[in-house]
Image (spheres, rainbow, N blue to C red):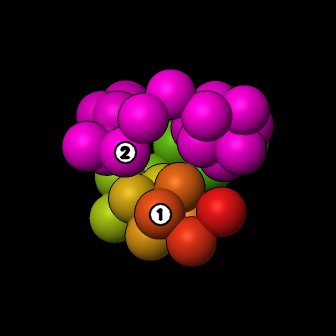
């Protein structure tokens, strides 16, 4: 579970929960 370089946002935190994938969580946090 690696947190992307994006700031700690509620969307990123929610994405990190269900989505435990690194490469998938990174673009999701950025796009959110």
The residue under label 1 is 30
The residue under label 2 is 6
Where 20 sits versus 26, above or below?
Answer: above
Numbered badge on residue 22: none
Q: Which one is nearer the viewer's eye here, 1 or 9?
A: 9
| The magenta segment | 1-16
Where 5 sits versus 2, above or below?
Answer: below
Residue 27 lies left or right of residue 17; in this view the side is left
Residue 24 painted magenta: no
Compute the Cα span from label 2 to label 1. 7 Å
SS for dot 2: loop
Q: Which residue is pictured at 39% across the width and 59% down the height?
A: 26
Q: In which quadrant will I find the N terminus?
A: top left
Q: Which one is nearer the viewer's eye here, 8 or 16?
A: 8
Give the x, y percent position of residue 12: 60, 42
Circles 2 and 1: CB distance less than 8 Å?
yes
* Residue 24 in sight here: no
SS for dot 1: helix
């Amino acid at each position: 579970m690696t947190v992307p370089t994006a700031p700690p946002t509620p969307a990123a935190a929610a994405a990190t929960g269900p989505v435990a994938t690194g490469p998938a969580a990174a673009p999701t946090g950025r796009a959110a």
